[in-house]
Image (cartoon, rainbow, N blue to C red):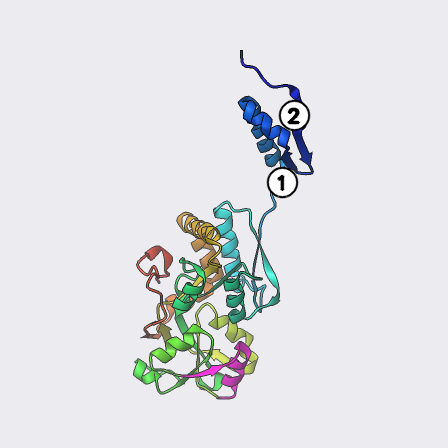
Amino acid sequence: MLRLPSSKWVKSLILLGDGVFLTKQSTSVMRRWPVAGIAIACLLLTRMLMVPAHAEVLVYPKRAHAGHPQVDYPVDLLRLALKKAGSPATLSPSALVIPQSRALRELAAGQGVDVMWSVTTREREHDLLPVRVPIYKGLMGWRVALVRADQRELLAKVRTIHDLRRFTAGQVGTWPDSDILIANALNVQTAVSFDSLFAMLRARRYDYCPRSVVEAWREAETFRAQGIVVDEHLLIRYPADSYFFVSRKQPQLARTIERGLMLALADGSFDALFRARFADVLKHLESSNRTVIRLDNPLLPEHTPLNDKRLWYRP
């Protein structure tokens, strides 16, 4: 018959709040009485399961104009991915609006920001851990021009990249798109901030501002009273998109987000959210007869999954 130790061993457990601790006496009992050890382990496990889980809060950089469905799309997609992956993590914006350059630095340092989204480059994939699922399905590399309302026909006769080189584009200097345009021998006037970019366009400091199709019509509406409209003649295309990025110290988080995004792709919920948020944009693209100017993207990392057709929008 199997002998059990005295019930005194139970008293050697100390329960403090939500924790269970083993005293020196209890560990001695566990060595002498294996069955008692199993019982203690079961008690520990039961106690741990009774403790309510505290979901991790992931901070992302707050963006200007939050509250607009298209601006909030990356947050909603990230929330969908976490749900699909079974993660209990919740999302919270930073207390203040953080410029992208600063958010990238904070994320790399593991301070203040846990996750963000940005156009991918070799440098960013070196400094941070990318989740290589393009969240806009490639549309960040589909560009239409914002122009002054009194110059709606400015680009009407552009047919080739050589024609386009007669004009000057405007971009924020820290955006990767600025380097992409320059690498393709296009003339670029840089601005120090998003707001100054449009002030310079109004002041005729440059001719046109290439913006991604997921941004252009919304921004034109914002600046309509200031005489800025979307050009109807040209579409500039180069391979590019935004990824979710996390700190290199958080590989598990990257795997969780990637798993959730791929599950959302598989069951159609990714595409459903994408099409719901950008229905008007896709309608513009699918019905337009724009001249397409294709550019190279020398900043594109070699591991970009360009051959995975599930990940990219195709009209």
Q: Which amino acid does label 1 sit on?
A: Pro
Looking at the image, is 45 positioned above or below residue 118?
A: above
Q: In which quarter of the image is residue 181?
A: bottom left
Tell whether position 112 is magenta. Answer: no
Picture quadrant where residue 144 is located: bottom left
Q: Residue at x 49, y 54 (%)?
A: 250
Q: Which amino acid does label 2 sit on?
A: Val
- CA neighbours of label 1 inside 10 A, class few (<14), some (14 to 19), many (20+): few
Say which mark, if any, is on residue 112: none
Q: Look at the image and give the residue range highlighted in magenta.
A: 188-204
User: Between residues 73 and 255, which one lies in front from this camera angle?
Assistant: 255
Q: In this view, does 203 lie above or below 6?
A: below
Evaluate if marks 2 and 1 touch, with contact meaning CB atoms under 8 Å apart: no
SS state under label 1:
loop
**Residue 32 locus on image (x, y percent):** 56, 23
Q: Residue furthest right?
A: 17
What residue is pinned by disc 2?
Answer: 10
Could you tell me residue 310's position as x and y percent? Answer: 35, 55
**Regarding mark 2 in the picture, which secondary structure is present there?**
helix
Residue at 59%, 63% in the rendered image: 67
Mark 2 or mark 1, whichever is nearer to me: 2
**Residue 78's spot in the image, x, y percent?**
50, 55
- Examine the rendering and report whether any part of residue 3 can be seen: yes
The one of 23 and 285 positioned closer to us in this rendering: 23
Q: Earlier in the sequence, mark 2 or mark 1?
A: 2
Q: Mark 1 points at which residue?
A: 52
Front residue of 238/221: it is: 238
Would residue 159 be visible to someone looking at this image? no
Looking at the rendering, in which quadrant would you find the C terminus? bottom left
Give the residue drawn at x 44%, y 59%. Answer: 129
State the CA–CA distance, disc 2 to disc 1: 24 Å
